[in-house]
Image (tube, rainbow, N blue to C red):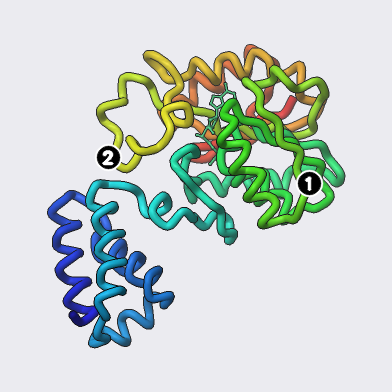
């Protein structure tokens, strides 16, 4: 079978299954098996696939048809220009979260102490450290499996022991103050469980759902404890849903944190 026929047929199946980027997804899977980029696939659309290549691509396509995200199929996701290992024990790092990395790199003074709470794959902490080697970074997560994967990503991208990883429920295992705290904690309301995409349903519930009604149970607990662990003059950066920003700003105000910056999904506070 020629590459162009495989792409056309598989993309049609993906489209029928409700996958939102059918052509791109099959190109990514074919490119992975053939070890070629998208421009090669386009320039060589007459390429004849051998039976082994065809089988490998079809096996991956079958997984995608059952709505497994590409990042879980290929076990990797690019974030802030770096390649992270991913598996279904961590949230797939989202490109919009890169804003937290950008703000951290710009706001944080030299040699500051940084805490990334709910690190998942380690994406935020590792991307910051890659760009600011001077910072002393601690990263925590309630999930042991997430911490293990984050450590593997850090070893791979930064080298051994560049970030301190700890399994902890919020600040439970933390006993010092930080100049910057970053949190992308779960904020999807529990009653949205049936409304999220089939792909998001394959991600860990502990990474997504933030509680009943407004989804802010974990953030409420987090804000109540933050002032104890944030240095005076230190920064707090968080991600939440746009509809939650007013409630989050109130939680911050109650805990003596001043809003200094915001965009659609992110808020920055100063202590
Ligand atoms: C939305 S994911 C974010 C992952 C990663 N920081 C990112 O941006 O890609 C939330 C993370 O918070 C972790 N988490 C959930 N509840 C927690 C808690 N009580 N204490 C610490 N981490 C928690 C989850 O295991 C998950 O890895």
Separation (CA) of disc 1 from disc 2: 36 Å
- Location of residue 57 in the rendering, given as x and y in whole percent from the top left corner: 29, 66
Q: Which mark is residue 198?
A: 2
Residue lying furthest right: 111
Q: Between residues 27 and 104, which one lies in front from this camera angle? A: 27
- Residue with the mark numbered 1: 161
Front one among 171 and 59: 59
Residue at left 30%, top 61%?
Answer: 25
Tell me the quadrant of the picture where the N terminus can be found. bottom left
Relative to 50, residue 100 above or below: above
Whichever of labels 1 and 2 marks the residue nearer the N terminus, that label is 1
Q: Quadrant of ligand 1?
A: top right
Which x, y percent locates residue 269?
A: 66, 29
Of 195 and 91, which appears nearest the observer?
91
Residue displayed at 75% across by 22% down: 174
Q: Is residue 72 left or right of residue 65?
A: right
Q: On the picture, is 145 further left or further right than 203?
A: right
């Amino acid at each position: 079978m020629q590459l162009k026929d495989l792409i056309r047929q598989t993309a049609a199946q993906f489209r029928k299954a409700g996958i939102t980027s059918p052509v791109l997804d099959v190109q990514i899977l074919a490119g992975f098996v053939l070890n070629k980029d998208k421009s090669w696939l386009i320039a060589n659309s007459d390429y004849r696939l051998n039976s082994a290549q065809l089988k490998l691509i079809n096996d991956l396509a079958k997984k995608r048809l059952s709505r497994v995200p590409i990042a879980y199929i290929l076990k990797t996701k690019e974030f802030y220009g770096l390649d992270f290992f991913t598996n279904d024990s961590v949230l797939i790092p989202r490109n919009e979260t890169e804003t937290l990395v950008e703000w951290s790199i710009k706001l944080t003074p030299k040699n500051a102490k940084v805490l990334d709470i709910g690190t998942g794959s380690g994406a935020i902490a590792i991307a910051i450290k890659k760009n600011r080697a001077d910072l002393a970074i601690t990263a925590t997560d309630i999930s042991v499996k997430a911490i293990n994967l984050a450590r593997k990503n850090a070893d791979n991208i930064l080298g051994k022991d560049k970030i301190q990883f700890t399994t902890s429920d919020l600040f439970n295992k933390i006993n010092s103050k930080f100049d910057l705290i970053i949190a992308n904690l779960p904020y999807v309301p529990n009653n949205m469980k049936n409304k999220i995409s089939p792909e998001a349903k394959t991600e860990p519930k502990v990474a997504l759902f933030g509680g009943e009604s407004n989804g802010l149970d974990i953030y409420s607990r987090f804000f109540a404890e933050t002032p104890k662990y944030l240095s005076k003059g230190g920064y707090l950066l968080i991600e939440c849903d746009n509809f939650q920003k007013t409630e989050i700003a109130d939680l911050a105000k109650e805990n003596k944190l001043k809003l200094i910056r915001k965009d659609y999904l992110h808020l920055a506070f100063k202590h």
